């Protein structure tokens, strides 16, 4: 842990250096409300002019970059978390409107090379998965996020408790792993074309992203809400 | 490591006799014996014996199925008349009048046969394939258990093995797998 801590990003670093070292963070910027064209300015500087809390920005970047980094409750409570729900909502939109359609496009092309019914079963596997993901996100947007907004506004709503969330929070990456196995182990050789490589890459990166997304919800959002629930009850 | 030996024999006298004979050897670890072969597959799945020493007269399952499905060496325990044809399917035959050394030797010689069979273990076994085909048609664990005449627990164990081998967890994913491998045809799907 100590090792990780000393490697965590600091606000004085140039944002461009952060991205050069970890290009995958680039996909986070828009979701966090930062546009490209930030030049050589520091992380703190760019965050400030974009209206993003620097500590919150670093917290998310650190979680995405360091696999064994679990922020302490103190670190979470010491950070301005007003950006959390908007960030999670933007992530949902990004997955549903960008990532999933990309994957579906390639899968459609692969399915056309499979004989009739097999192609249909193959593609409907993904369509079902997509529906599950959308329903999963919708539930969070309808139940969980309004609860957090209410708590942050100092309102006490007794209808929902975050402990329900953990009980019902199912993993949404599992079926992507199934899909990966099907694609690179069991597809017949005649469908081996560039779509296969593209889709494997897309699925891998989405799966990684979703794992971090789940992590942020379970290890950052849940402790935060627990604290807010307790504070408002006492 | 000691090999695990499961004795399946209804006669208490014979079981106790075998236990006494095998007591001071270091090759086999004796599992708690079974009196009947009724829930044999469940028992094998649960305690994973390397060798099965069984009275052929009480075995109602197919020896070849047991051997191939569970990678277990199956040795016949004979003290009554058993047809020669029946014994051919076994990996060895222990006669009740055999001495201690011969019994241990027979059991030990049966082992490599099972090891040979356990190679290539990433392919689905016949039973696993049967479970997969039932699942792919949308059946629940309970319905699969009823269809194949095994316990729900056994179905769950087979599912775990299928997932371990294929890397696929969801039923929907397994259905795609089954179709790609021509294990089910289109008419089997609703």
Image (cartoon, coloured by chain):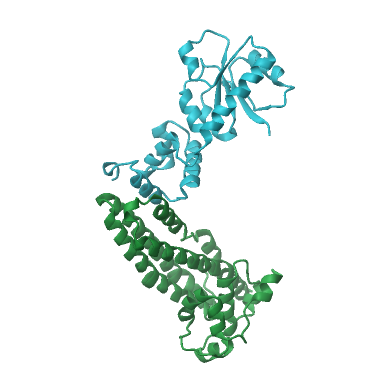
Chain colours: A green, B cyan
Residue projecting furthest to the left? A116
Does B38 appear above or below A18? above
Q: How many marks?
A: 0
Q: Is residue A111 left or right of residue A203?
A: left
Does A24 appear above or below B131? below
Residue projecting furthest to the top? B81
Q: In front: A27, or B84?
A: B84
Q: In front: A138, or A92?
A: A92
Q: Position of residue A106 (x, y in %)?
A: 33, 63
Q: Position of residue B4 (x, y in %)?
A: 63, 29
Residue at the spot 49% in from the left edge and 36% down from the top edge: B154
Asked if residue A135 shows in the view, the reply is no
In which quadrant is the C terminus of chain B drawn?
top left
Res B125 → quadrant = top left
Does A205 appear above or below A154? above
Q: In front: A61, or A171?
A: A61
Q: Is residue A112 left or right of residue A77?
A: left
Q: Is residue B44 left or right of residue B185?
A: right
Q: Position of residue A201 (x, y in %)?
A: 43, 64
In which quadrant is the N terminus of chain B drawn?
top right
Asked if residue A72 shows in the view, the reply is yes
Res B13 → quadrant = top right
Residue at the spot 35% in from the left edge and 63% down from the top edge: A194
Residue at the spot 43% in from the left edge and 67% down from the top edge: A137
Residue at the spot 72% in from the left edge and 26% down from the top edge: B26
Q: Position of residue A157 (x, y in %)?
A: 52, 73
């Amino acid at each position: 842990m100590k090792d990780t801590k000393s490697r965590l990003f600091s606000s004085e670093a140039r944002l461009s250096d952060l991205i050069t070292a970890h290009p995958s963070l680039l996909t986070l910027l828009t979701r966090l409300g930062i546009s490209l064209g930030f030049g050589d300015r520091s992380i703190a500087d760019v965050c400030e002019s974009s209206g993003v809390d620097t500590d919150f920005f670093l917290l998310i970047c650190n979680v995405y970059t360091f696999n064994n980094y679990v922020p302490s409750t103190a670190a979470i409570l010491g950070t301005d978390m007003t950006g959390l729900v908007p960030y999670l909502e933007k992530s949902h939109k990004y997955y549903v409107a960008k990532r999933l359609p990309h994957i579906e496009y390639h899968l459609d092309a692969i399915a056309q090379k499979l004989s009739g019914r097999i192609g249909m079963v193959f593609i409907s596997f993904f369509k079902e998965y997509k529906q599950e993901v959308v329903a999963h996100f919708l539930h969070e947007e309808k139940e969980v996020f309004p609860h957090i907004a209410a708590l942050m506004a100092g309102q006490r709503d007794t209808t929902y408790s975050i402990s329900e969330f953990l009980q019902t929070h199912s993993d949404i990456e599992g079926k992507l792993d199934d899909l990966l196995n099907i694609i690179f182990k069991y597809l017949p050789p005649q469908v081996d074309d560039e779509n296969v490589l593209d889709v494997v890459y897309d699925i891998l990166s989405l799966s990684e992203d979703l794992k971090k997304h789940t992590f942020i919800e379970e290890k950052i959002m849940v402790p935060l809400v627990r604290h807010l629930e307790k504070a408002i009850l006492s | 490591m000691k090999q695990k030996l499961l004795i399946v024999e209804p006669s208490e006298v014979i079981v106790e006799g075998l236990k006494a004979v095998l007591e001071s050897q270091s090759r086999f670890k004796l599992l708690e014996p079974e009196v009947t072969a009724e829930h044999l597959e469940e028992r094998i799945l649960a305690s994973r014996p390397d060798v099965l020493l069984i009275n052929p007269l009480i075995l109602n399952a197919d020896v070849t199925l047991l051997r191939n499905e569970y990678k277990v060496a199956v040795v016949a325990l004979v003290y009554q008349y058993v047809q020669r044809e029946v014994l051919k399917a076994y990996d060895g035959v222990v006669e009740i009048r055999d001495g201690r050394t011969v019994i241990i030797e027979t059991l030990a010689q049966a082992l490599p046969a099972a090891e040979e069979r356990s190679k290539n273990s990433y392919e689905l076994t016949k039973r696993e394939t049967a479970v997969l085909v039932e699942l792919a048609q949308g059946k629940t664990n309970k319905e699969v258990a009823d269809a194949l005449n095994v316990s729900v627990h056994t179905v769950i164990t087979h599912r775990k093995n299928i997932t371990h081998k294929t890397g696929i967890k969801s039923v929907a994913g397994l259905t795609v797998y089954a179709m790609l491998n021509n294990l089910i045809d289109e008419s089997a799907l609703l």
